[in-house]
Amino acid sequence: MSVSAVQAQYQILTDVPVQHPETDGWMQFPFSGGFNNPQFSSIDFSGDGLPDLFIFDRSGNTVTVLERISGPDADPVFGLSTAYDSGIPALKDWAMLYDFNCDNLPDLFTYLSGSAAVYQADMDASGVSFSLLLEEMTYTTSFEIPIYTSRTDLPGLADVDGDGDMDVLAFSVTGSQMRWFENKSNDLGYGCDSLIFVKADDCWGNIFEEESCDGAILGATCLGISETADEQRLHVGSTILVFDRDKDGDQDLVLGDVSCDNLVYYENGGSPLTANMVSKDPAFPDSDVPAIITEFPGAYLVDMDLDGALDLLVAPNDDQLSVNRYNILEYENMAVTDTLQWQYKGNNYFTANTIDVGEYAKPVWMDVDGDGLLDIVVGTGSSFEPGMDKRYGLWLYTNIGTATEPAFALTDMDYAGWSLYEKRDLVPAAGDWDNDGDIDMILGHFDGTLSYMENTAGAGNPAIWAAPILNFYGIDVGQNAAPCMYDADGNGTMDLIVGEQNGNLNYFEHSGSGVTLISENWGGVDVRTTGDVVGYSVPRLLHNEAGVLELLVGCVHGSIYRYTDITDNFDGTFNLADSAYLGYNRGMFSAVDLADINGDGKMEWMAGNIRGGLVLFRPGEAVGITDNAALDNSLHLYPNPVGDYLQIDGPPGEGVIINLNGQVVRTFYHDGTAVAVGDLSPGLYYLTLTATSERWVAPFVKR
């Protein structure tokens, strides 16, 4: 497996193939984490002459860098890159790139506290990184005033007056008209390397935005702030794209509105110094296929195929109500002159090249077809595509690879028929609940309840799911139940640890006849930070590669909490070892599961997030096991992976084999003879050998 290192703490696996759902090929960036409300900019991160994609997603405030692989005049091919992540600051609500200082490195502009912060781009041997230049952009009257930008808006960055420096267009907090903040850098003799603004116009373009999706009123007069008290309304959101479409020397305009699903184009019939919009087109950019997307579209100019002509990408900017699949429209620039004429190309490029189940992806590793290879089952908060109602349920990505070279294909978008029950925010957990040797499922729901699905197939067979038992044992943890199965009390049956919206964990002990609530604050776990009301805890208990029991918990902020000191301490308070384990955070509402999917004895980590995508990674070389117990190389297990009989090179002693759910599946006394393991289900196990006062732990893989 190829990896991409991120700050030496974790490595994203970049070459685990996933089949393209519409072709015979493979996805280009399958584990990039999905796209809900992406904002696109171009930048050449590596300096290889090929512009890459900088994608900020306001759903979860996450940046994804897609590095260009294809050359000029070719269909676009990109790959996920994390090489530049350490040089990208934390961003919020909106982010765009613009080379304001004319050094051929686009700089970074982002929302900050009602204005915009500026990060200057720099290039060194490792690529482009950004450093803070201004905490807020300001304009000068008799004193300095922050340039207001809304968190919901996208401001316009462009050389509005054609004097060579970057100006800003933005709506005021109560405005229906756009303000032009003119950059005086060139006029003052500084060239284009400064940001020195004055407010040049309160009504740029002479348009007045009403609550209409057909476009603003043209020819609106403006003398300073011209709106009367009756005309004023609270500005609630607009996306602004400024560019010279007809190449006549002045800037034309495209606006998206928060309450609309279309874009409106305005032609500037004025001059660079005095803009005047003379016509509008609410069916932009192509009357045959206008850019219609639910909801609040934003428009971005990117040369996707490197033919020298700017193409148009359109994506929703509303992080609450928008469609979340097939949600990025691509229009190819077909102009043979300098003008910009776009033709609809499709909406599938980004969605079809990454795993994306919509929103709030909650994954679990399971061998559902009995072939000994772990598949991926993903619960979705909802899947919302253009022209369709929201869908809920489970998605199945089947492992079509081998025991050492995994590969996946989407084989079911309604696995086990869960769409029938219209349960949103499904969180699946896998384990042998009924102790019959096969893997069952327990699922958490938005309403705080659980459901149970029994697998009646028997060990080693493709799963056959009985009808779900809804409202399982009457358990209700409030909201957003997130279950995990583990034999916490060591009685040979699975118990339940259930996360919830409040960020704590609930522990239910399972006996043969039912479940008993033992604790609503199990281990003292709370993934809320100071000031938080909610936490959205998603637990996973597992034995790490040293055989030590750990608790990992996903949370609303997107990091992973790691708890230790759990063994023999189930009634106590666990040790919070890390609230940002591995430095991982690739999107809010994290949910993680672990398994060895290629038989090398090391865990692969899979994490879901709010954007509906998955990230596949493993701890980096710099991250070690910090617990007291550790692997002992003197305990040698072979063959590994094993079929029927496992040989142990170690001293005589008491042996125990446990699975990833903590269940003891075999006890024996090691006297030098091989241990029969042929009846075990395929997967990763840990063998513990105790002799006198010493203890050894080693993993092995059952084929």
Image (tube, helix red, strand yellow):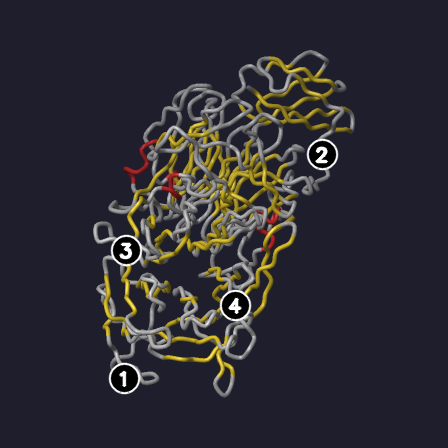
Mark 1 is surrounded, within 10 Å at the Cα level, by few (under 14), some (14 to 19) or many (20 or more) other residues, namely few
Q: Is residue 682 positioned above or below 164 on the image?
A: above
Going by the numbered disc 3, the residue's amino acid type is Pro
Q: Sequence-wise, which precedes: disc 1 or disc 4?
A: 4
Q: Sequence-wise, which precedes: disc 4 or disc 3?
A: 4
Q: Sequence-wise, which precedes: disc 4 or disc 2?
A: 4
Asked whether the beta carbons under mark 1 and mark 3 sit within 8 Å of each other, the answer is: no
User: The residue tagged with tag 2: helix, strand or loop?
Assistant: loop
Q: Nearer the viewer, mark 4 or mark 2?
A: 4
Mark 2 is surrounded, within 10 Å at the Cα level, by few (under 14), some (14 to 19) or many (20 or more) other residues, namely some
Q: Nearer the viewer, mark 1 or mark 3?
A: 3
Which residue position is annotated with label 4?
Answer: 117
State left or right for residue 263 relative to residue 429.
left
Tell me, for residue 228, which label it has, or none.
1
Q: CA distance from mark 3 to mark 2?
A: 61 Å
Query: Can you give x and y, in whole percent of width and height, for residue 506 in the image?
Result: 50, 46
Figure disc tally: 4
Query: Can you give x and y, in whole percent of width and height, for residue 224 in the image?
Result: 35, 84
Tell me, for residue 630, which label it has, or none.
2
Residue 509 in view here:
yes
User: The residue tagged with tag 1: helix, strand or loop?
Assistant: loop
Q: Is residue 9 positioned above or below 533 on the image?
A: above
Q: Is residue 509 positioned above or below 218 on the image?
A: above
Which residue position is annotated with label 3?
Answer: 285
Q: Sequence-wise, which precedes: disc 1 or disc 2?
A: 1
